[in-house]
Image: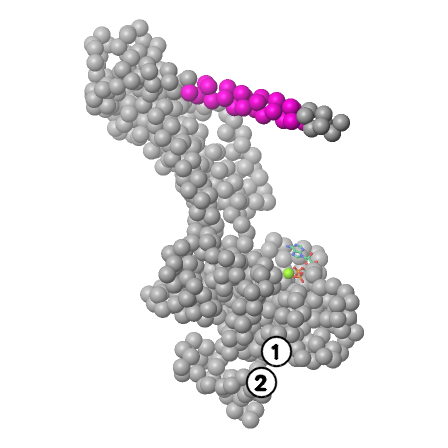
Amino acid sequence: MEDASYMRRKLVDHAVRGACFIAALLAVVPLFSVLYYVASKGAGGLNLAFFTELPKPVGEEGGGMANALVGTLELVGLACLFAMPLGVLAGIYLAEFRESKLATVVRFSADVMSGVPSITIGIFVYTLVVLSTGHFSALAGGIALALIMLPTVTRTTEELLKLVPEELREAGLGLGVAKWRVTMRVMVRTALPGIATGVMLAIARVAGETAPLLFTAFNNRFWGGALDEPIASLPVQIYTYAVSPYEDWHRQAWAAALVLVTMVLVLNVTARVLVRHRVRAR
Amino acid sequence: MTAIASSINAFRGVASSVPDATRPVETAAQSRLEVASKKIEVEKLHAFFGTAEVLKGIDLPIYSTKVTAIIGPSGCGKSTFVRCINRMHEVTRNARTTGRVLLDGRDIYARNVDAVTVRRRVGMVFQKPNPFPTMNIRDNVLAGLRLNGLSTRDGETIVEQSLSRVALWDEVKDNLGRSGASLSGGQQQRLCIARCLALEPEVILMDEPCSALDPIATARVEALINELRERYTIVIVTHNMQQAARVADFTAFFYMGELVEHDQTKVIFTRPGNQRTEDYITGRFG
Ligand SMILES: Nc1ncnc2c1ncn2[C@@H]1O[C@H](COP(=O)(O)OP(=O)(O)O)[C@@H](O)[C@H]1O
Ligand SMILES: [Mg+2]
């Protein structure tokens, strides 16, 4: 009697475990197949020229995406420049003044904003910046990416600050340290690795955004370093080349995709390693 | 005799940061004889959390370079009381106080007094050891100075002195770069006391400093309190009656937000003047 129920429990246990294992396996299949596919298609297009040369005019073979590579870095850099200070400070505000009316409003807006499709943000910045200045620009692209990053950075900062034990605040205040110093040098300092991780994940997300850049940064066949000029970026370049009829451009689009995926992957892995490191330091 | 004692005390008040060698040497017997001066006088202190009145008019003197124990059943307001003495109570949302707390005769709640300065003179040790996890042992000791933006040019000396005073120096001197969180609970608590001492406070408030520690670590902290009493005015909250009897010169018994009785510890424990005190210390309730 007892043996029978034991066997049954054991059986159910095995079945559930097996199901979970298969589900977990299936979940990583898309990731690895995408990685494999992009790597196998893209590796052939990677060469020195890809990283150092400008795109060749239509019809000519060869050339590279150096400008798009630098452009993506510039756009992401601009986005960080805007979104990081604003997002981190807003997150600190949310964590420190949890119950204030403004905090409730900001928190709600951030949540709504993080759900807004990125193309909508592109159109918004197009209306606001591109139409009013009269041209596409790196600045507009940076602003669009910043708006996409902002809610993530804000909420991550808030959540991570909330995880810092209140005892540390008490310890700081008890040592006669002024409130804002305790906030910055104890609370934020303790949450910093986590905040950095959140920022990195946000960067990884916007680095691949295409839609909002089509309306804002547009594209540029040349080196466009200036803030008020259109600028090339990897996602937009991939898009442009992928829909073109040229075999060589398709090859380059795959190569660019591989580079972009690698960048995002490296950012993600770095972020995770940082978290792991932090947990071990505890 | 009284005149001599009070002049010694006056000298002490001025010279609280002078190193040991230059202080008047006195034996424990002498210090017990001397008439203690009041370091802190609490007058008609009421404390509130929102509308709930948690302390209902406390009047209590706290004597200079003596250990005062606060005892009483859980929830009677012991923590709230000590947090009122360094203005930590007001850190809690909606918490407020009325009444006066005189530190060397000056009300710390007076309008022109900054809570931050009060807290530097009246240090605090918490129930749960709370070293800063992002700092190593050395930086934890210097945290008060660093975070306050004060100079740490004598840092190494301060670290060694403070850690020696809490008898932690020999245990950690080779590992000052290690995280404070890597120490045992008892070591962490002594580190927190060292961190407090590094700021040269005049008064040290301890809120159940041993309740998270094992008996051996507890004994070490008690021995430490016995040494610190030479220089500092100490207020210790404890739910452990034996601990109060062992370390305190004076004991105050709180009950439901009121001060029931305050006297020399030996009086409280041998012939308390109030029935409730006697019931509590004999374990009839609480
Ligand atoms: N943050 C708070 N908000 C509201 N009430 C509190 C808070 N902290 C403590 N209290 C209440 O104040 C009373 C005294 O608490 P406390 O001083 O912590 O007691 P003790 O330290 O003697 O156990 C208790 O009734 C407790 O419930
Ligand atoms: Mg308490």
Residue A257 belongs to the span the image colors magenta: no
Circle number at residue B32: 2
Q: Position of residue A212 (x, y in %)?
A: 41, 22
Q: Quadrant of ligand 2?
A: bottom right
Q: Is residue A250 above or below residue A8?
A: above
Disc 2 chain ID: B
Q: Residue type at mark 1?
A: Asp
The answer as to whether the residues below labels 1 and 2 share one chain is yes
Residue A187 position in % (x across, y down): 48, 50
Q: For the point 79% across and 74% down, which residue is it?
A: B275
Disc 1 and disc 2: Cα gap in Å? 9 Å
Magenta-colored span: A9-32
- Residue at 67% of width from left, 63% of height from top? B77
Look at the image and tell me whether residue A122 can be seen: yes
Asked whether the residues under the numbered discs 1 and 2 touch, taking CB atoms below 8 Å apart as contact, a structural biologist would say: yes
* Percent of width and height locating residue B219: 56, 68
Question: Which chain is mark 1 on?
Answer: B
Q: Quadrant of residue A98?
A: top right
Which of B178 and A270 lies nearest the eye of the viewer?
B178
Count every numbered label the image shows and give the total.
2
Q: Quadrant of residue A37?
A: top left
Mark yes or no: residue B149 visible: no
Q: Circle 1 sits on which residue?
A: B249
Q: Is residue A57 above or below residue A22?
A: above
Q: Is A17 in the magenta?
A: yes
Mark 1 residue's CB less than 8 Å from ligand 1: no
Q: Which numbered disc flags the more N-terminal residue, 1 or 2?
A: 2
Q: Secondary structure at mark 2?
A: helix
Q: Residues within 10 Å of mark 2 (few under 14, many from 20)?
A: few
